[in-house]
Image: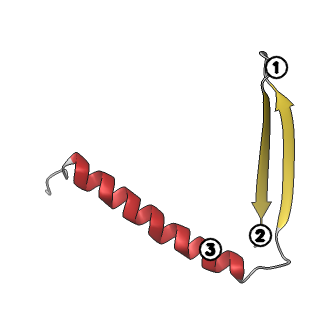
Amino acid sequence: DSDIPHRTKLARLIIDKFIEEHNKLKCELQNTLGRISFTSDCWSDINLQTHMAISGHWM
């Protein structure tokens, strides 16, 4: 069994993994120009604060 990494090391590993996956996603999206569909939704909550969600879909 391996030891659980220290919190600072774990935080660094998470950030490194995020950067790696973010770069992969950027490369993939550059190759899908013109083939991405977007959907959006706008709403307000009970306190009348407005929200917007935008999603992109590709295959």
Hey, what amino acid is under mark 3? Lys
Q: Report the residue at 86% width, 78% height from top.
A: 34
Mark 3 and mark 2 lie on one chain; the one further toward the N terminus is 3
Q: Report the residue at 78% width, 34% height from top.
A: 51
Q: Along the horizontal axis of the image, is 48 left or right of 31? A: right
Would you name the residue on which mark 3 appears? 26
Mark 1–mark 3 distance (CA, rounded to whole Å)? 35 Å
Q: Which mark is residue 48?
A: 1
Report the front residue among 30 and 58.
30
Q: Residue 42 in the image: x percent, y percent?
A: 86, 38
Hey, what amino acid is under mark 2? Trp
Q: Report the residue at 54% width, 67% height from top.
A: 22
Q: Secondary structure at mark 2?
A: loop
In contact (CB < 8 Å): disc 1 and disc 3: no
Q: Secondary structure at mark 3?
A: helix
Mark 1 and mark 2 lie on one chain; the one further toward the N terminus is 1
Q: Along the horizontal axis of the image, is 30 left or right of 22? A: right
Would you name the residue on which mark 2 appears? 58
Hey, what amino acid is under mark 1? Leu
Q: Residues within 10 Å of mark 3 (few under 14, many from 20)?
A: few
Mark 1–mark 2 distance (CA, rounded to whole Å)? 33 Å
Picture quarter containing residue 43? top right
Q: Is residue 11 shown above or below 22?
A: above
